[in-house]
Image: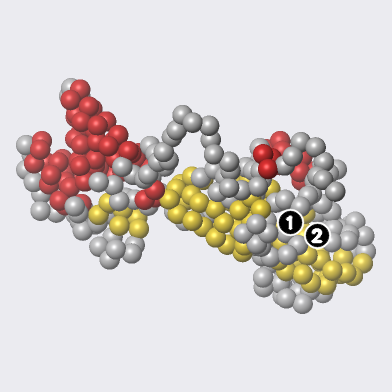
Amino acid sequence: MTLVQLVQAVCGELGLTQPNAVAGSTDPQILQIYALLNKVGNNLITEYEWQRLVKEYRFNTSIVTQTGSLTSGSAVITGLSDTSGIAAGTFMATGDGVPSDCYVLSVDSATQVTLDQPATDTLTGEVVFTQTKYALPADWNRQIDRSNWDKTNHWELIGPKSSQEWQYLKGGIVATGPRMRYRIFGNKFQIWPPATTQSRLGFEYVSKSWVVAADGLTYKTQFSADDDTALFRDRLLITGTKYEFFMIKGFDVTMLSRDYEIELEKEKSSDHGAPTLSLQPPRAQMFISPGSIPDGNFPN
């Protein structure tokens, strides 16, 4: 159903006058039902890990390696060949004479950048600028645990790390390793240690866009046009809106609450498949695991 049809169905079941238009309506009661319908949809996003809202996001790490001149006590690096691929605040600098955990504070020109810490030595040498902070997808609502992978090196990313672990990694004596760590912080997907070669990273997330425009291609976070449709079933949205309408009016919601809960459970149970459970001992894993390694030494 479209937005208009959903509101018409709600009004019809409540015994109210059905509107011909919703998004541009001036009727306070229609506008209230319109707002409550959007509320139901936005609440449903966090109710369950809906497969229809799950998306995969992939991106490449960005690395720029150049030769630059550093001066001890100065945060400015000069003599770079091209700074167009470097961004302030998201790129970290590493190299001889560059302090640890040092970010680009500003990109001053095509040949110069300023770091957020002064250099510890005077020299001209190789400086590696690595992006360690990446923007999340525009429709990102929440992460799906253990879906983060370095697809280039075939390693699962380790994380998410806590504040304490993150600061230990960035400031401790032993702060690197072959495996990449990650943390979502400041609405950025952050990685550590800074990559030395480009990698393809990816993860799955739950989208907050549950409304589809009439073109079938544009996704929205709420209804905004009369011909919009939803990714949730019509009956779930209708019963949810009726329940919210009675709640806000102060009416008895016992029966409407029950109807909504039934529809919600039906929607969850049919959203995606589930594995078949057995009381028998589990079968051997198909992948190499600790169970594949003998207790003693391998035979000669």
Q: Secondary structure at mark 1?
A: loop
Q: Residue furthest front?
A: 300
Q: On the image, numbered disc 2 is attached to which residue?
A: 94
Query: Would you say 137 lies left or right of 70 here?
Result: left
- Residue drawn where x is 77% and y is 77% of the image: 81
- As displayed, is residue 143 above or below residue 112? above
Q: Which mark is residue 194?
A: 1
Query: Would you say 255 lies left or right of 51 here?
Result: left
- Residue drawn where x is 72% and y is 42% of the image: 293
**Marks 2 and 1: in contact by CB < 8 Å?**
yes
Q: Secondary structure at mark 2?
A: strand
Q: Position of residue 2 (x, y in %)?
A: 19, 54
- Residue drawn where x is 76% and y is 43% of the image: 169
Q: Is residue 185 visible in this depiction of the protein?
A: no
User: What amino acid type is highlighted by mark number 2?
Assistant: Thr
User: What amino acid type is highlighted by mark number 1?
Assistant: Pro
Question: Along the line of sight, which residue is nearer the eye, 58 or 277?
Answer: 277
